[in-house]
Image (cartoon, helix red, strand yellow):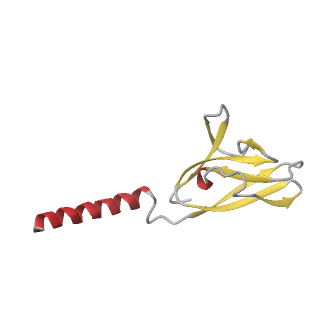
Amino acid sequence: MNEQMKKGRNMKSETKVNRRNRNNGGQHESKRIHFEFASPTAESVAIAGTFNDWQPNATPMIALGQGRWAKDLALPPGDYEYCLVVDGQWTPDPLAAETVSNPFGGVNSVRKVGNGD
């Protein structure tokens, strides 16, 4: 293999690595993100979203008593859609600053995790 071919192959590899790091937050650390919910009648509350592949049982919230629920997650920077699953019913987070329509005719909550959060 001649020098130019080697150089071209190395540049390609380096570019792929740089692109991959930039796109997946390669140098960005996860941030602790706090979720809260209040419902005096809820018996179970979980969070399902893009960060856990929309698995309704993967991220249960912790009952704090008096109808309060909370959960801390470590998430890398990015925008995440999610819903709360309250006693098996999917519902948007009433405390979410932003929502988007979902393909099921409902609404997903959005949590933005930035580099400085």
Q: Position of residue 81 (x, y in %)?
A: 60, 46
Residue at x 14% of width, y 63% of height: 5
- Find residue 82 and report its horizontal and vertical position in percent: 64, 47
Give the farthest residue toward the left.
2
**Front position in the image: 89 or 34:** 89
91 w.r.t. 22: above or below: above
Quadrant the N terminus occupies: bottom left
Image quadrant where one finds the C terminus: bottom right
Residue for point 55% across, 64% down? 30
Outermost residue toward the front in this view: 1
Dividing the picture into quadrants, the one containing residue 107 is top right
Tell me: residue 110, above or below residue 25. above
Q: Position of residue 12 (x, y in %)?
A: 25, 60
As drawn, the residue found furthest toward the top would be 105
Q: Relative to 79, is 41 on the left or the right?
A: right
Q: Nearer the viewer, residue 33 or 59?
A: 59
Report the side of 15 relative to 39 (left or right).
Answer: left
Q: Is residue 27 left or right of residue 13?
A: right
In the rendered image, the vertical position of residue 53 relative to residue 94, given as above or below: below
Residue at the (72%, 60%) spot, across then down: 71
Q: Is residue 92 above or below residue 17?
A: above
In this rendering, the count of numbered labels is 0
Q: Position of residue 94 (x, y in %)?
A: 73, 43
For the point 39% across and 59% down, the residue is 20
